[in-house]
Amino acid sequence: MQNRLKIERAIKNLTQDDLAKLIGVSRQTINSIEKGRYVPSTVLALKISKIFEKPVNEIFELEDSD
Amino acid sequence: METKLVQPLLLVLVVLSIGLVSWLSRDKNEEAVFKKLKLFPRWFKFVGLFIVICGVSVPWIFQGLLVDGGNHLGSIYIIFGLFLICFSRDKIEDEMSNIIRLKSFYRSFGAGVVGFFFLTYIENSISDDFSQLSADTLLAVILGFYLVSYYVTKSKIRSAE
């Protein structure tokens, strides 16, 4: 699964730590999501989309291999 | 007779107090209970560490507590301490750490079962008597393997940043 988390974070001028605090997870979790090592749950994806005020499928995108 | 009764009563008391503390510190939000693993508060980790240190050191300091030259009482305390360390929360407990915990339990349980068969086979092939791995050794290996697996995975994630 691809994601635009890093880009969206840069647009909003948020650090990984800021975003982690806003959604109540660790900074390592945000880093793992950005690098595609961890796929977040629906709840976490919805929390992220709420922060960036964009639909979930604009931030997260399925790949052909998924 | 009286001294035989003290230890089981003490154990029941400890189990009941753990139950009481975890019930008092439970998550009031019912939904959150189903989203996250139920774990002891973070300070239980330090209590567990203290119990492990006591389990390792006390019977060796007071030689009278050693049974047949072995630290049997200590091994029970070590297992109990490891249990508290394994089942207490981290500073930040989120869904990724819950998944790492579950994977570590899966690995350690698998390793424990495979290790049990392997070590029993080795022991029986070198000795004439049929003997199995003791429960305290197996539990200590499973809990120890879980801790190693959990913290190695977490440090790998941290170092990959």
Image (cartoon, coloured by chain):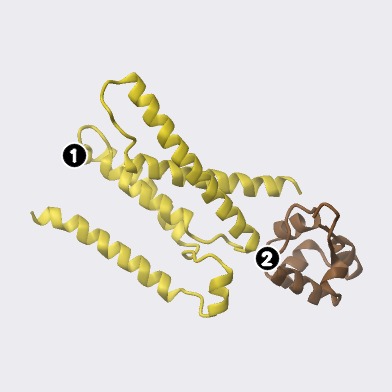
Chain colours: A brown, B yellow
Could you say where residue A16 lies in the image, as x and y percent from the top left?
78, 62
Q: Find numbered disc 2 in the image and state the secondary structure of the residue it sits on.
A: loop
- Front disc: 2 or 1: 2
> Front-most of B3 and B123?
B123
> Front-most of B68 and A1?
A1
**Label 1: few (<14), some (14–19) or many (≥20) C-alpha neighbours in 10 Å:** few
**Could you tell me which residue is drawn at 50 percent across and 62 percent down?**
B42
**Could you tell me which residue is drawn at 33 percent across and 49 percent down?**
B77
Question: Looking at this rendering, what residue extends furthest in the left direction?
Answer: B1
Residue A10 is left or right of residue B131, and the answer is: right
Alpha-carbon span between mark 2 and mark 1: 49 Å
Residue A3 is left or right of residue A33, and the answer is: right
**Label 2: few (<14), some (14–19) or many (≥20) C-alpha neighbours in 10 Å:** some
Could you say where residue B33 lies in the image, as x and y percent from the top left?
53, 73
Could you say where residue A59 lies in the image, as x and y percent from the top left?
85, 67
Q: Are marks 2 and 1 on the same chain?
A: no
**Could you tell me which residue is drawn at 47 percent across and 37 percent down?**
B114
Quickly name the residue at label 1. B64
| Residue type at tag 1 | Gly
| Residue type at tag 2 | Val
Question: Which quadrant of the figure contains the N terminus of chain B?
Answer: bottom left
Above/below status of A38 relative to B73: below
> Front-most of A64 and A3?
A64
Q: Find numbered disc 1 in the image and state the secondary structure of the residue it sits on.
A: helix
Residue A43: give its label. none
Quickly name the residue at label 2. A25
**Number of marks in picture:** 2
Chain under label 2?
A: A
